[in-house]
Amino acid sequence: MSTRPPRGGRHPARRLALQTLFEIDFNRADARETWQRGAFRAGLTEEAAAFAWELVEGVLQHRKELDSEIATLAPEFPIETMARIDRNILRIALYELRISGDAPAGVILDEAVELAKMFGSEAAPKFVNGVLATAVGGRERPSA
């Protein structure tokens, strides 16, 4: 039986944060337990798992202000009816853009669009890109 090496990097960490927040949003699961189970299944390095937890905890602590900004940025899509995946991708990206602030905006937007491609509907990447481009005050990035 072979064991794979732990996975590092921020992309798998963001993916875990999204999956954790989605599960919490969907069934009110315990945040820490959900994150720990996901980190174990994903085989993340300690550093990547810690970054994922920082995102989860930060989004949960700032959810009201993040949701308020999302409502302002996308007024035609009420937050409570928005797809859970889209809502949580936007929360993570806005948390990184506005609060944690240790990655360039372009990287955060690209990562959010990638998550939308992986987990969202066909329209999700364009929607996420448009909302976040508005948030950073720039034009939409091409979403191939």
Image (spheres, rainbow, N blue to C red):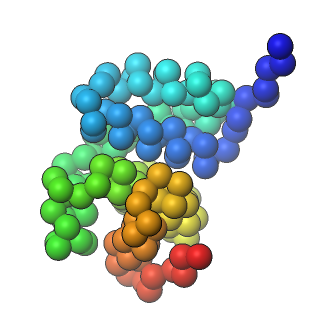
Quadrant in the picture for residue 70: bottom left
Give coordinates of residue 18: x percent, y percent: 44, 44
| Vertical side of 92 occupied by 124: above or below | below
Regarding residue 33, the answer to whether it shows in the image is yes
Q: Position of residue 110 (x, y in %)?
A: 55, 66
Image: 124 above or below 133:
above
Looking at the image, which is closer to me, 41 or 49?
Answer: 41
Q: Is residue 14 left or right of residue 44?
A: left
Q: Quadrant of residue 121?
A: bottom left
Which residue is found at the position 31% from the left and 33% from the top?
A: 24
Q: Name the residue furthest right.
A: 2
Task: Identify the residue at horizontal 32%, vertical 22% (top origin).
Answer: 30
Quarter of the figure with the N terminus = top right
Q: Is residue 101 left or right of residue 25?
A: right
Residue 133 place in picture, x, y as percent:
41, 76
Please tell me which residue is depicted at 51% across the width and 80% down the height of the picture: 141
Instruction: Looking at this view, name the residue that lies furthest to the front.
Output: 122
Q: Is residue 75 above or below residue 38?
A: below
Relative to 74, residue 19 above or below: above
Task: Provide residue 61's location: percent of width, then percent of height.
Answer: 28, 39
Q: Which residue of the protein is positioned furthest toward the top in this rendering?
A: 1
At x 41%, y 35%, the residue is 20
Quadrant for the C terminus, please: bottom right
Residue 94 or residue 113, whichever sits in front: 113
Asked whether 93 or 81 is in front, the reply is: 81
